[in-house]
Image: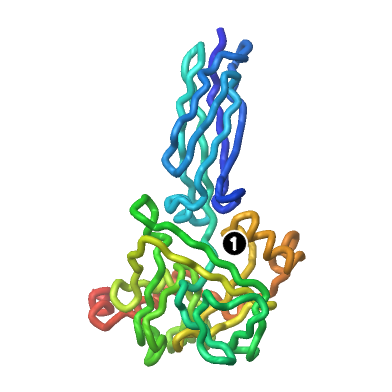
């Protein structure tokens, strides 16, 4: 007797073509010929997705890469969709796994970046423009990218919300006005605790790991435009009195881009195709998560620190 056998497939966040994640397969019978035995249909999924199957069991799955639930995934995290398909000998399933990757660090539109000609909104900067860096003076931008995300009410949106660093949250005048960054954007932290934890004077720490619900918070927005600035080497940039990183195109950073954007960067740095470490080291030591959490507690307002100690 012909028995329908379940099938599986997978896609990976940001490995898209024209904003669409896609995979395909052919569901079969364990015994017997399944040609013409399947119900041809289109089944709607949960992530701007659908599964289209023909009468021979050939199926194609597509999903909207910009869906907030997909974009909220980090490396190692997954979403699963299960589609029930029908044949002349009963039903079976096609299970799709959506694999996540970390989001690349970036500035929110409107952020003022220090340049030799004064602060400029990040969205006005282009390849070849000079930006002031902490370590190497004025440096030319090798590549500037942008990404617009729709963050209206859908599952997983919290992980994509920009982080608001309120004035003076990292020290007097740091920043000197409220600043919005992407969750994985790493800011430069200087504090006596940094030396005790790492033996260094300053470190880079992801903004999301410093959130304290008071002076550093997630910003509720319906839409956000993130901007990336890439240089010949990893740099520390100034914005509103706060130092933070330029885009770092290591393996995880590039995995956070779609195919077209990734190819733009790889055309500039072709060695990254086979050797992700060829770009060089980060401009400063990057904190481990437990170090970042200790720094977050240190930087929290005094009442919060007392509550945490209790």
Q: Secondary structure at mark 1?
A: helix
Task: Give the image location of residue 281, x and y in percent.
Answer: 65, 75
Residue depicted at x 60% and y 85%: 131
Residue depicted at x 38% and y 78%: 165
Looking at the image, residue 96 sits to the left or right of residue 162; the answer is right
Task: Give the image location of residue 303, x and y in percent.
Answer: 23, 80
- Tag 1 residue: 252
Residue 291 in sight in this render: no
Residue 309 in sight in this render: yes
Question: Quick one: 161 or 115, which is closer to the camera?
Answer: 115
Question: Quick one: 2 or 106, which is closer to the camera?
Answer: 106
Question: Quick one: 137 or 260, which is closer to the camera?
Answer: 260
Residue depicted at x 73% and y 60%: 273
Residue depicted at x 44% and y 34%: 44
User: What is the total number of numbered labels drawn onto the structure image?
Assistant: 1
Tell me the quarter of the picture where residue 283 sits.
Answer: bottom right
Task: Give the image location of residue 258, x and y in percent.
Answer: 60, 55
Image quadrant occupied by the N terminus: top right
């Amino acid at each position: 007797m012909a028995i329908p056998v379940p099938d599986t497939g997978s896609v990976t966040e940001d490995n898209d073509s024209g904003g669409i994640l896609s995979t395909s397969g052919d569901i079969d019978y364990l015994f017997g010929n399944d040609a013409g035995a399947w119900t041809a249909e289109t089944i709607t999924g949960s992530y701007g997705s659908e599964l289209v199957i023909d009468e021979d069991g050939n199926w194609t799955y597509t999903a909207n890469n910009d869906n907030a639930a997909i974009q909220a995934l980090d490396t190692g995290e997954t979403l699963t969709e299960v589609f029930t398909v029908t044949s002349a000998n009963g039903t079976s399933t096609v299970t799709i796994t959506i694999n996540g990757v970390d989001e690349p660090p970036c500035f929110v539109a409107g952020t003022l970046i220090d340049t030799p000609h004064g602060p400029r909104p990040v969205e006005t900067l282009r390849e070849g423009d000079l930006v002031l860096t902490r370590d190497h003076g004025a440096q030319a931008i090798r590549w500037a990218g942008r990404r617009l995300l729709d963050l209206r009410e859908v599952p997983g949106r919290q992980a994509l919300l920009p982080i608001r660093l309120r004035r003076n949250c990292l020290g007097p005048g740091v920043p000197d006005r409220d600043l919005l960054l992407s969750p994985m954007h790493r800011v430069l932290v200087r504090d006596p605790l940094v030396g005790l934890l790492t033996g260094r004077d300053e470190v880079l720490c992801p903004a999301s790991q410093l959130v304290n619900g008071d002076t550093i918070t997630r910003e509720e927005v319906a839409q956000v435009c993130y901007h990336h600035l890439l240089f010949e080497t990893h740099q520390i940039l100034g914005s509103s009195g706060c130092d933070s990183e330029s885009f770092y195109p290591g393996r995880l950073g590039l995995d956070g881009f779609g195919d077209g954007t990734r190819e733009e960067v790889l055309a500039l740095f072709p060695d990254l195709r086979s050797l992700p470490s060829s770009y060089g080291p980060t401009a400063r030591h990057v904190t481990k998560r437990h170090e970042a959490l200790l720094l977050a507690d240190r930087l929290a307002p005094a009442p919060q620190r007392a509550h945490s100690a209790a």
